[in-house]
Image (cartoon, rainbow, N blue to C red):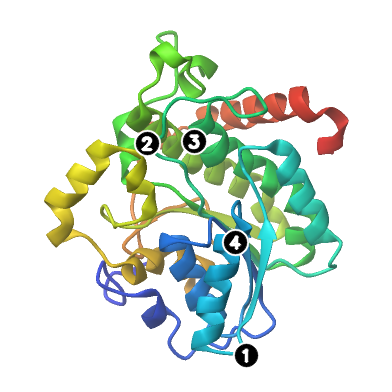
Amino acid sequence: MNTRQKYDGNTTAMEILQGCDLSGKVVIVTGANTGIGFETARSLALHGTLVILACRNLQKGNEAKHKILEEWHKAKVEVMSLDLASLRSVQSFAEAFKSRNLALHVLICNAAYLGGPWQLTEDGLEMTFQVNHLGHFYLVSLLQDVLQRSIPSRVVVVSSESHRFTEIKDSSGKLDLNLLSPLKKDYWAMLAYNRSKLCNILFSKELNRRLSPHGVTSNAVHPGNMMYSSIHRNWWGYTLLFALVRPFTKSMQQGASTSVYCAVSPELEGLGGMYFNNCCRCLPSQEAQREETAAALWELSERLIQERVGSQSK
């Protein structure tokens, strides 16, 4: 599959969607009120999709919705409350969405936490790990039946090239929860983020292995190089790095292009378990390709959720 001639790092989400009529399609985008998530949601909504903005901050979510409606008053955009740092909130979101009896053609796991101080969620896990990985894992598991009823359907997991700079196993080669959800004394914001982004690719790979026989595919994406977003405000080092590389960064529209490509491109129909950068398939790190690590992470994630929400997760 060669897409290199068609799109590249300069391609925008709107260019990917040129000529597309996505009327009747339903897409959920997490973290859709700002940055890449907003541009992803906006681009899809302007092409007829019913887009659910799944946001922690409802006020910001509604502001994002109104921005899209100002651009096209017929856009179908809704805002729903989702806080990935709370498994209870994830469950409430899934129940509220299911009560609508809508299809779900694409779920874009875009929301991310980067650079904040160490803190535990209400579920007792380190914030970066839960928001970036476990909350999305639980969300997909709760919406799996809707995705399967809506086939062909897709999951897009937003990862990062920074996944290449870390691993999540201890010296004996076993998956280590203390690396994934570290104690305060062991916490470094960027490392926690990198590990969560490695989890994203492993999760997407294992999800595709399990669900693709049922018509649901999953791919992971790298959105672009150091695009400006509110995420950088949490960490002065990120702000400094951004200032240094700003001439080489993508716009938000360019940053959203790979998510949108994996969400709607006809040439990806039925294809998953891959990693995309600049709308082109590329190989992730060796660690991200290990099937046994992906399976172990899945089992650990299931156990962490089971311990916290018990039979309610079924």
Is 20 placed above or below 250 here? below
Q: Nearer the viewer, mark 2 or mark 4?
A: 4
Left or right of residue 178: residue 186: left
Please name the amino acid that badge 1 sits on.
Lys
Name the element at disc 3.
helix
Name the element at disc 2.
loop
Q: Nearer the viewer, mark 4 or mark 3?
A: 4
Q: Which mark is residue 199?
A: 3
* Sequence-first disc among 4 and 3: 4
Decide: few, some or many residues near mark 2? Use Cα within 10 Å; few <14, some 14-19, many ≥20.
Answer: many
Decide: few, some or many residues near mark 4? Use Cα within 10 Å; few <14, some 14-19, many ≥20.
Answer: few
The N terminus lies in quadrant: bottom left
Examine the image and state in which quarter residue 294 appears: top right
Disc 4: which residue: 59
Camera sees residue 203: yes
Disc 1: which residue: 74
* Sequence-first disc among 2 and 3: 2
Q: Residue at x 50, y 77 (%)?
A: 67
Examine the image and state in which quarter residue 78 appears: bottom right
Disc 2: which residue: 115
Camera sees residue 291: no
